[in-house]
Amino acid sequence: MQAPPSNSADWLIGKSRARNAYLDQVARLTARYRRYPGVALDNKQAGRVVTRVTIARDGRLIDVSIDTSSGWPAIDAAELETIRRSAPFPSVPNDMPGDPLILILPIHYDLPIAARNR
């Protein structure tokens, strides 16, 4: 039996589901290691940082870099450290393309309520 053409809606939806499930695994793993940097809390710094994460098919971290800065060096550095501490990642599912896999991960560092009222 032949695989459906890459423009088949069902095939594309299946690929999206696999990618979304893998991204969910990565998000849950990295959330365990994410810490708001103290200097950013003290200075009421918040922002969105986007990382570019390159993962080998076996889950090894190959590279991580800032794709879009939050504008705050402490937040950017904290997110890079979060990604590094989270490795290794789960193996990439067989039905997901990419060797290596490149993920673009946006993360919001929002001040906790207590820090906003300091």
Image: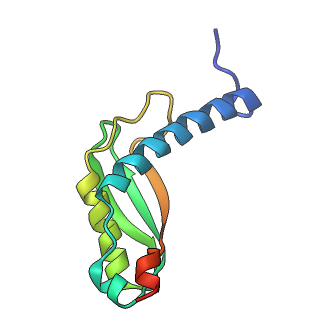
Q: Is residue 53 left or right of residue 88?
A: right
Residue visible at 37% across and 91% down in the picture:
43
Can you give x and y, in whole percent of width and height, for residue 93 in the image?
43, 31
The x, y position of residue 74, in whole percent, is: 32, 81
Rendered residue at 31%/41% (across/down): 59
Query: Percent x, y for residue 52?
Result: 43, 62
Q: Is residue 35 above or below residue 5?
A: below
Q: The C terminus appears in which quarter of the rendering?
A: bottom left
Left-right relation of 65 to 4: left
Q: Is residue 58 visible?
A: yes
- Which quadrant, please, contains the N terminus? top right
Q: Position of residue 87 (x, y in %)?
A: 26, 49
The residue lying toward the viewer, choosing from 84 and 107, is 107
Residue 111 visible in image: no
- Residue 63 sits in which quadrant? bottom left
64 or 108, which is in the foreground? 108
Q: Residue at x 53, y 40 (%)?
A: 19
Is 52 above or below relative to 15?
Answer: below
Is 77 drawn above or below residue 102 in the view shown? below
Colouring scheme, one of rainbow, by chain, secondary structure, one colour: rainbow
Number of callouts: 0
The residue sitting at 36% across, 77% down in the picture is 75
Which residue in the rendered view is the most extreme toward the top? Answer: 1
